[in-house]
Amino acid sequence: KQEVTQIPAALSVPEGENLVLNCSFTDSAIYNLQWFRQDPGKGLTSLLLIQSSQREQTSGRLNASLDKSSGRSTLYIAASQPGDSATYLCAVPVHSGNTPLVFGKGTRLSVIA
Amino acid sequence: EAEVAQSPRYKITEKSQAVAFWCDPISGHATLYWYRQILGQGPELLVQFQDESVVDDSQLPKDRFSAERLKGVDSTLKIQPAELGDSAMYLCASSPPPNTEAFFGQGTRLTVV
């Protein structure tokens, strides 16, 4: 059974700092990995999708890497801003194709001005 | 930009009452998911549809929960009777075939009193 773990559970950093969020999964036979952002009381916004054949994906100040063999992914946020404050979730499909996602519990990020 | 629409955004109901949530996926997305998210946890799958057919409802508490997607487009999730433990965020997501990237709606926050 696939299990996803995110460390740390919470993180507080001063504005402008670069930071790394970690995600690990127990079954390395994943189809892809997706990072989401969730603001309090809101739904999930997709940030980045990394296919299993890719090593990393970039979108603006965000960079996500994937190491399938070690069962790890990292989300790097450069030059953090107060607007980045949110919960960040990673998720992997149970199987290949249109299958449901297994989520970690998320990392709650606070960027202090 | 196309979005997954959910309504209502918030619902407060008394214990033992019936409650229903509605979801309209992104046009053309054959796969639709309902997830439940308890505060501080990651979302967990309740039911998955492929067009109008249920693919996976193994985690749906069928004694009180029901879901339908009659025409393979929008979907309704019902709880009857609601219990205090059902208080959570209910999230709808859809995926375009064959890509597994999931797009989420804003969710329905249910409070059972």
Image (cartoon, grey):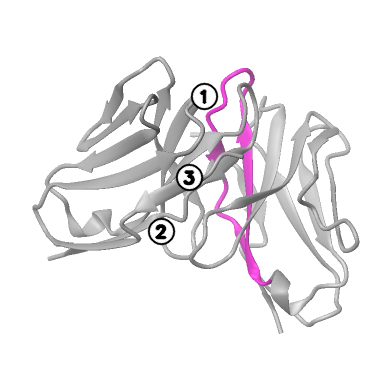
In this view, B108 is above or below B3: below
In the rendered view of the protein, which quadrant contains the C terminus of chain B? Answer: bottom right
Q: Secondary structure at mark 1?
A: loop
Relative to A12, A102 lies left or right = right
Position of residue B101 measured from the top left corner of the image (x, y, whole percent):
53, 29
Q: Which mark is residue A39?
A: 2
Give amino acid for label 2.
Asp
- Residue at 56%, 39% in the rendered image: A2
Chain ID of residue with mark 2: A
Give amino acid for label 1.
Ala
Residue on which disc 1 sits: A29
Give the quarter of the image for residue A68: top left
- Residue at 54%, 38% in the rendered image: B103
Chain ID of residue with mark 3: A
| Mark 3 vs mark 1, CA separation in Å | 13 Å
- Residue at 78%, 76% in the rendered image: B83
**Do the CB atoms of the residues marked 2 and 3 lie less than 8 Å apart?**
no
Give amino acid for label 3.
Val
In this view, B16 is above or below A99: below
